[in-house]
Amino acid sequence: MMRRKPRRMRLLWYCATLGAVVSAIGLHSPNLLRAQIPTAERLLYRGWWPRHSAKADDSYVGPAACAACHADKAKTQKDTPMARTAVILGAEPNILATHGRLTFQAGSFGYQFAMADGKAMYTATDGTRSLSARIKWSFGDGHVGQSYLFEKDGKLFESRVSYFDSLKGLEFTPGRKLSQPHDLEEAMARPVDEEEQFRCFSCHTTGSTIDGKLESTRLMPGITCEACHGPGSTHVVAQKMASVQGQAWEAGKDGDLIFDPGKLSPVDAVDFCGSCHSTWWDVKLGGIEGIGNIRAQPYRLEKSRCWGKKGDARLTCVACHNPHEKLVRDTLAYDQKCLACHAAANSGSPSPDHPGPACKVGTKNCTSCHMPKFEDPATHYTFSDHYIRIVRQGAPYPD
């Protein structure tokens, strides 16, 4: 994973930076420093926010209940990368089952994932001794890669190696490589502490945290409806009662008793997605520097000049990406999104509703130039940089 500053240093940096921001208000406030706050502080609020802890486990109803009224959205959402970002292995087909057997050698240590009687088994060896464990969880839908967790003696462990799709094989899990492991146990895996479990499961599953405690036996794998809209039990009950009376709550109204992210301001909307994809402050406080922050799309987006001081609804995450549908990978498909702000090539000068000037170089495939791709060595994957800008040839990656 990405290198982070010690917690105490991050807090001191945060306080110092806030002081600088306050003193700069009205003088020279950069686009980035507006109303954003770290996700950790968002979670202190009583209202719903992704990764929030619910008060009771029966407040979640599951995607099947949502599908009863929202069939179209539910049908497509279940096939999105978010919906498959965590899977209990053995419950359904998976990458390890597709490959059957994967191996990796690093010095004197060998690693293997193999299927046996429908179970995904992980084995590490030093050439003399071997250790094996049954993999329980896979994190990541696989188009970039997958990391794996197993349980031993009541504790959760992360495997030292992961699957990477670009390699069609195994390599060290980002940030987990050890130059000289002390023993086979350390070479095989690392323990995942409680705080990290909260973070991992709250972003990769739904309903993982109840009354401030991790409930790994009751959660729903992947990001389903209630991960973004909040627990739906009161909403479902209200809708059923209204239906009996021949009525229905109007979607999006306060009485609908479900959270509607579509009501959020542009700044809050990007921070909303940033709960798991990293907001501007999450990146700064986490000390995520260099090419590693290309995976923090909200942070990169908010650096863009066209984002503006208060954000723009035409430039939020959901303006380009429908969370209920598969990710669109055809770059041409995003041209219409760019032209929602930018003047077309032959339309003349910018206007109030299209403040962006026409591009002087091209008329299509905008993102290929203004959102260039960079490879993240840690994940062996090439990501689109969401820092929208005029890219100078030969310019280094802008942190």
Image (cartoon, rainbow, N blue to C red):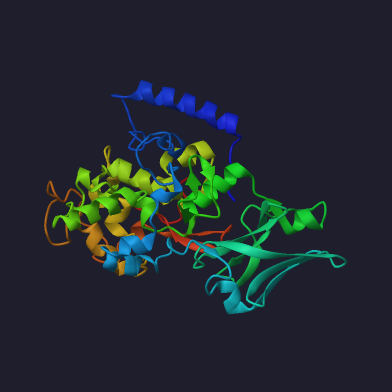
Q: Residue at x 56, y 60 (%)?
A: 379
Q: Residue at x 43, y 39 (%)?
A: 39
Q: Is residue 324 visible?
A: no
Closer to the camera, 300 or 138?
Answer: 138
Q: Is residue 138 visible?
A: yes
Q: Position of residue 341 (x, y in %)?
A: 20, 53
Lateral position of residue 167 relative to residue 42, left or right: right
Lateral position of residue 31 relative to residue 336, left or right: right
Q: Position of residue 61 (x, y in %)?
A: 38, 56
Closer to the camera, 21 or 138?
Answer: 138
Above or below for 23 versus 367: above
Q: Residue at x 62, y 71 (%)?
A: 169
Q: Residue at x 49, y 68 (%)?
A: 143
Q: Position of residue 265 (x, y in %)?
A: 26, 42
Q: Residue furthest right?
A: 128
Q: How many marks?
A: 0
Above or below for 160 versus 3: below
Q: Position of residue 276 (x, y in %)?
A: 45, 49
Lateral position of residue 118 relative to residue 67, left or right: right
Lateral position of residue 36 relative to residue 150, left or right: left
Q: Quadrant of residue 19?
A: top left
Closer to the camera, 20 or 322?
Answer: 322
Q: Quadrant of residue 80?
A: bottom left
